Image (cartoon, rainbow, N blue to C red):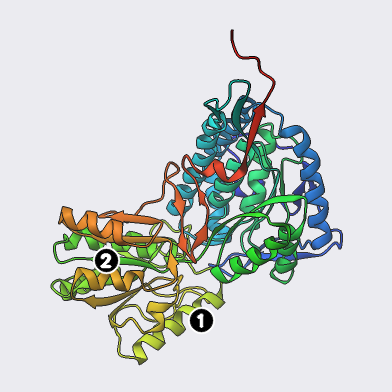
């Protein structure tokens, strides 16, 4: 095991094995798959291409570890989580460089993710000590009833590539704080960040078997997910990814009536009312749409702009995109827009833009594939978009701002709520009464009012409708990993 040091580099955290039972292990088959840098196309390294039998073994390991970990005190868990947090802070630059290599996001964004990611460990280190129960009022003199909360058991987790560090800590941090054990499959696009955190967890004193990370290629992803969902040993599934895959996993969980937390797709509206400050709204739009090259589930997807300021807003947004955003390798200091995760993502985004332009939309910025490589797409602003275009109906997951004109507040809310997604939403107004009305009318789990960056360790992250089940982060995040138990004590003699 490497000693902790703030001087470590990204290469020292690039492990070519999975992590099970506190050991670095290969796939039983001996197979591996390559991990690419999306900015350059170069092979960063390879990791085990595990199959169902590898996951089954990891589940058994986690179950054995749970029999002891469940009885550790909240204080013990808290101390380990806090050490893990400190190690992440010490190695922030190395961990961020690893994210940039395998995900492509700019260094500043990657370092921001490490801080966000580590914050969940610090948060849940404290929440571990606050899993309170209740003592209920007596209903008959000789009985007492209390409700306690206990760890749910072995948890299965599947994390995405867009936040390869933060999604691990937001899920596993809560589960471990609650007294659960974890079997986690990271995205095949970004496995190194997850494996790096295993190393630091071990250095922090996390016992073997409490955190297990299994890696697998896209070809094996379905089989690994199915095993996690259908295993009778796994008591809980947590997944972040597309709605289509989430529905498959939820149906597989039904066979064992397994508890599930699903953070799924979004189609976030970004509403700009006539009373909004245009400069502030444009700054919010840049932050909300183009962060991580538009590849987050809470990115603004549909820009709904009231007719009184529509022309002013879209022109200002187009100018800001051209002036402020620069594509490039994430390690270049001037880069604000890294690559999309793979060439397939570029094809999807380009298809949505071409469909919109073919249906009458105008390009105010970008609108083409980038010239820097197969995974780059220009930051794009489209005007004259209508609600029936694919770019307004589908989750873009790329750097495209599609601007739709509306007349009234009622129309804006109706358009915003018309989709089957309900994750994040945003609006800008200087009318306080409107702020209350609209924030309560929007059918979304997250609402930003004159604010585009809503995510925080302390905040609850939850989706409505087909954007998810359950919540993560904040004071309620640990609840997903606890079961309630009602205990009735009888035979108690009433006081004479």
Report x, y in % for residue 132.
Answer: 54, 30
Mark 1 vs 2, N-terminal side: 2
Figure check: 400 above or below 146: below
Q: Of residues 365 and 122, which is closer to you in this image?
A: 122
Q: Residue at x 57, y 46 (%)?
A: 480
Q: Residue at x 69, y 28 (%)?
A: 72
Q: How many marks?
A: 2
Measure the alpha-carbon separation of dots 1 and 2: 28 Å
Report x, y in % for residue 150.
Answer: 65, 36
Label 1 sits on residue: 347
Q: Nearer the viewer, mark 1 or mark 2?
A: 2
Q: Would residue 356 appear left or right of 271 to someone viewing this image? A: right
Residue 487 appears in the picture as rendered: yes
Point out the residue furthest to the top here.
496
Determine the secondary structure under disc 1.
Answer: helix
Residue 335 appears in the picture as rendered: no
**On residue 271, which mark appears?**
2
Q: Quadrant of the C terminus?
A: top right
Q: Would residue 475 appear left or right of 146 to someone viewing this image? A: left
Q: Of residues 445 and 10, which is closer to you in this image?
A: 445
Determine the secondary structure under disc 2.
Answer: strand
Label 1 neighbour load within 10 Å: few <14, some 14-19, many 20+: some
């Amino acid at each position: 095991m490497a000693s902790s040091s703030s001087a470590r580099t990204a290469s020292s955290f690039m492990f070519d094995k999975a992590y099970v039972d506190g050991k670095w292990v290969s796939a039983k088959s001996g197979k591996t798959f390559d991990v690419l840098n999306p900015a350059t196309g170069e092979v960063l390294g390879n990791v085990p291409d595990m199959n169902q039998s590898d996951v089954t073994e990891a589940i058994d390991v986690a179950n054995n570890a749970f029999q002891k970990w469940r009885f550790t005190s909240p204080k013990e868990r808290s101390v380990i989580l806090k050490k893990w947090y400190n190690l992440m802070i010490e190695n922030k630059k190395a961990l961020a460089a690893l994210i940039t290599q395998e995900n492509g996001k700019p260094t500043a964004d990657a370092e921001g993710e490490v801080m966000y990611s580590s914050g969940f460990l610090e948060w849940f280190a404290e929440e571990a000590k606050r899993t309170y129960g209740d003592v209920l009022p007596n209903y008959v003199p000789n009985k007492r009833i209390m409700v306690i909360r206990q760890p749910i058991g072995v948890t299965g987790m599947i994390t995405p590539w867009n936040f390869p560090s933060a999604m691990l800590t937001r899920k596993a941090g809560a589960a471990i704080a609650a007294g659960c054990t974890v079997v986690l499959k990271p995205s095949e696009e970004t496995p190194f960040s997850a494996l790096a955190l295993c190393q630091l967890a071990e250095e922090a004193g996390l016992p073997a078997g409490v955190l297990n990370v299994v890696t697998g290629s896209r070809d094996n992803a379905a089989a690994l997910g199915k095993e996690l969902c259908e295993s009778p040993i796994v008591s809980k599934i947590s997944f972040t990814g597309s709605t289509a895959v989430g529905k498959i996993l939820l149906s597989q969980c039904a066979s064992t009536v397994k508890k599930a937390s699903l953070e799924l797709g979004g189609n976030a509206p970004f509403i700009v009312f006539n009373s909004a400050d245009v400069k502030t709204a444009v700054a919010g739009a840049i932050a909300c749409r183009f962060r991580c090259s538009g590849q987050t589930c809470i990115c603004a997807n549909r820009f709904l702009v009231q007719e009184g300021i529509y022309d002013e807003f879209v022109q200002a947004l187009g100018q800001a995109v051209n002036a402020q955003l620069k594509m490039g390798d994430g390690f270049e200091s001037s880069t604000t827009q890294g690559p999309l995760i793979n060439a397939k993502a570029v094809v999807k985004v380009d298809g949505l833009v071409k469909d919109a332009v073919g249906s009458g939309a105008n390009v105010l910025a970008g609108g083409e594939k980038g010239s820097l490589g197969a995974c780059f797409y220009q930051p794009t602003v489209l005007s004259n978009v209508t609600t029936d275009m694919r770019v307004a109906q589908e989750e873009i997951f790329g750097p495209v701002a599609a601007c739709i004109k509306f007349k009234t507040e009622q129309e804006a809310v109706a358009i915003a709520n018309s989709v089957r997604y309900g994750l994040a939403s945003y609006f800008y107004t200087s009318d306080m009464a409107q702020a209350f009305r609209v924030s309560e009318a929007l059918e979304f789990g997250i609402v930003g009012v004159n604010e585009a960056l809503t995510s925080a360790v302390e905040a609850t992250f939850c989706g409505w409708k087909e954007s998810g089940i359950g919540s993560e982060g904040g004071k309620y995040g640990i609840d997903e990993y606890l079961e309630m138990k009602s205990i009735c004590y009888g035979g108690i003699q009433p006081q004479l």
